[in-house]
Image: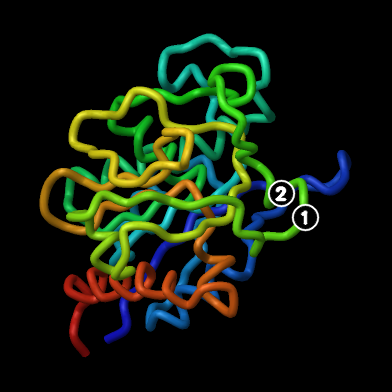
Amino acid sequence: MKPYIGISCGAFRDRDWCPPANFLRKNYTDAIITAGGLPLIIPVLEDIEVLRALYDRMDGILISGGGDIDPRFYNEPPQAGLGPTDPMRDEIELPLARWAIEEGKPLLGICRGSQVINVAMGGTLYQDIPSQIHTQLVHDSSFTRQDWTYMAHELQLEPESKLAQLFGTNCIMTNSLHHQSLKDLAPGLRAVGWAPDGVVEAIEGAGEGFLVGVQCHPEALQGAADTRWQALFRDFVESCAVGAPAL
């Protein structure tokens, strides 16, 4: 049976007088479908019991990209350059990440999702790369060029990492649409990928099971831009399928 993949989403507010809408870009669900999974969007909600019931129905969790995490969740005051936050989304994604990590359910974090994994496990973030890290590398160049498939820089991978084995290389090009990054890495995680300036851009769990976070947006690359990124989604979905019930 194809596994059910729960994908977190954000709240979209198009008008002040309208109720917020659940928002997720289509290429996330496209990537999961291409990899053989059944995507189900986890809505923004306030009831933790409903969230847990949804989580229990899923065979794997994908935490998607989005805005900044409220720094109170990693015990820091707001710094200059912090962007808009959505504490309600934080309150959904942090428990999802913790449950999956504690129970060994496959977990994939993309961009913000990678940061959520780190914060959920006790790590911290650079709230704004330009103001907190001395670097000449522009980490949001795919965003400023308005091109999700723009290959902004190389991602150097640990040779023994899962990602290097999946891609068959220690170096792969990535897009880049972020202004925050991982700072103090949480216990139980290991850095396995770096931007040319040393910023950590890929993490994996130190134990068994599928626990991967990437700072780039592979869901936008795995189509025509670079099909090698499909391997990440295939491995994730196959890991989820191991726990899926048989018909």
Q: Which mark is residue 122?
A: none
The front one of 141 and 87 is 141
Q: Which residue is mark 2?
A: 143
- What is the x, y in percent for residue 126? 50, 23
Q: How is the image coloured?
A: rainbow
State the residue at coordinates (66%, 47%). Answer: 11
State the residue at coordinates (60%, 59%). Answer: 151
- What is the x, y in percent for residue 17? 88, 42
Q: Check disc 2 and report its element: helix, strand or loop.
A: helix
198 relative position to 185: left or right: right
Using the rendered view, name the quadrant where residue 80 is placed.
top right
Quadrant where the C terminus is found in the figure: bottom left
Residue type marked 1:
Gln
Residue 111, compared with residue 181, is above or below; it is below
Most extreme residue toward the top, as rendered?
77
Quadrant where the N terminus is found in the figure: bottom left
Crowd around label 2: few <14 · some 14–19 · many ≥20 (10 Å): some
Q: Check disc 1 and report its element: helix, strand or loop.
A: loop
- What is the x, y in percent for residue 6? 42, 62
State the residue at coordinates (64%, 37%). Answer: 138
Evaluate if marks 1 and 2 touch, with contact meaning CB atoms under 8 Å apart. Answer: yes
Q: Which mark is residue 146?
A: 1
- What is the x, y in percent for residue 245? 20, 78
Using the rendered view, name the quadrant where residue 56 is placed.
bottom left
Most extreme residue toward the bottom, as rendered?
247
18 relative position to 93: left or right: right
Crowd around label 1: few <14 · some 14–19 · many ≥20 (10 Å): few
Real-space Cα distance between discs 1 and 2?
5 Å
Residue 155, compared with residue 119, is above or below; it is below
Residue type marked 2:
Phe
